[in-house]
Each structure stands twice: as C-alpha cells, then as structure tokens.
Amino acid sequence: MIGGIAGIAGGTGRRWLVAALTASAVLTSGCTAPVDPDELPGVYRDKETGSEIALDSDGTFSATAVSTDGSSRPGDFSGQWEYVDSSSSDFIMLDIKDGGLREVTGVQLYPSGDGTVEFRTPDEPPSLVLTKTSAP
C-alpha cells in the first residue's frame, strides 16, 4: 500500500511540475509578440539618449551613439545584420565591421515585436530600448 501511495504522490508531483512548466512557457512566450523579419528594416531611435540604429533591407546596419551594454561609452559602428530565429529567444545578430566596437563580435539585438529592439544581457533589464521611427 505504501508503494501505491508513493506512486500516486509521484504522479501528482509530476503533473504539478508539467503544469507549472507549461504555465511558465506560456507566460514567457507571451512577453514578446511574434516578429516578422521582413518588418525589421528601418530606423530605431531612443529620444532620451540620442542613440540610433538603422537596419537596412540589404542586411547592413549603422549605429550612432549606441552603448550595447549600458555601461560603455556610446559609439558609432556599422556592419552586417542577420535575423536569427532561435527556439529560446529570436534575435538580430550584429556583425560589426567598422567603428568603435570592432573588438566585440556577435552583438545581439532583441526585437520585441511591437516596433522596438533592445540590447540586453541575460537576467537583466534592457540596457537600451530603441523604437522604430521609420521604414527604409
């Protein structure tokens, strides 16, 4: 009989865990709207800091007065961009070719699906949020 009770408790525990993980996945996926990569090109700006990034439809980008981590001095840089459809969190990979951040590779910019993109590090709030001001 004890084995039967343990089996029931184990099944209930597993069901609770599955329910909790499912709810967590639903809440997490609800944080950002779906992103259409074809809608990404355009100019994004932060009025407060004057930071701007232009994603061109040919896969190039230019950034003006941008700090990617919130602690470094803002700089100007440019290069190639590519949308990465990831199972955990979609992002825009910035391959910097020219400018002050050339020593940094693989900078990630996260689209939110509501006309904004943001620089962020894991488990931290965004260090810079840019809002789309125009299409190419």
Image (spheres, grey):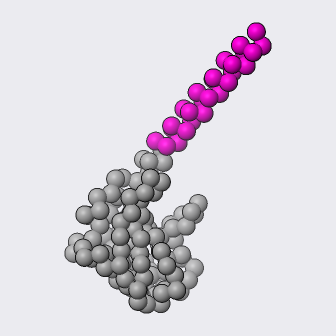
Q: Main secondary structure of the magenta part?
A: helix
Magenta-tinted stretch = 1-26
Q: Position of residue 136 (x, y in %)?
A: 21, 75
Residue at 38% from the left image edge and 85% from the top image edge? 78
Image quadrant holding the N terminus, namely top right
**Could you say which quadrant of the image residue 114 lies in?**
bottom left
Q: Position of residue 96 (x, y in %)?
A: 42, 82
Residue at 40% from the left image edge and 54% from the top image edge? 32
Vertically, is 68 above or below 13? below
Vertically, is 4 above or below 21? above
The answer to if 117 sits in the magenta stretch is: no
Vertically, is 32 above or below 117? above
Q: Position of residue 132 (x, y in %)?
A: 31, 70
Residue at 49% from the left image edge and 86% from the top image edge? 101
| Left or right for 11, reference 31 | right
| Left or right for 16, reference 86 | right
| Left or right for 9, reference 72 | right
| Left or right for 2, reference 64 | right
Residue 15 visible to the viewer: yes
Q: Residue furthest right?
A: 2
Vertically, is 96 above or below 91? below
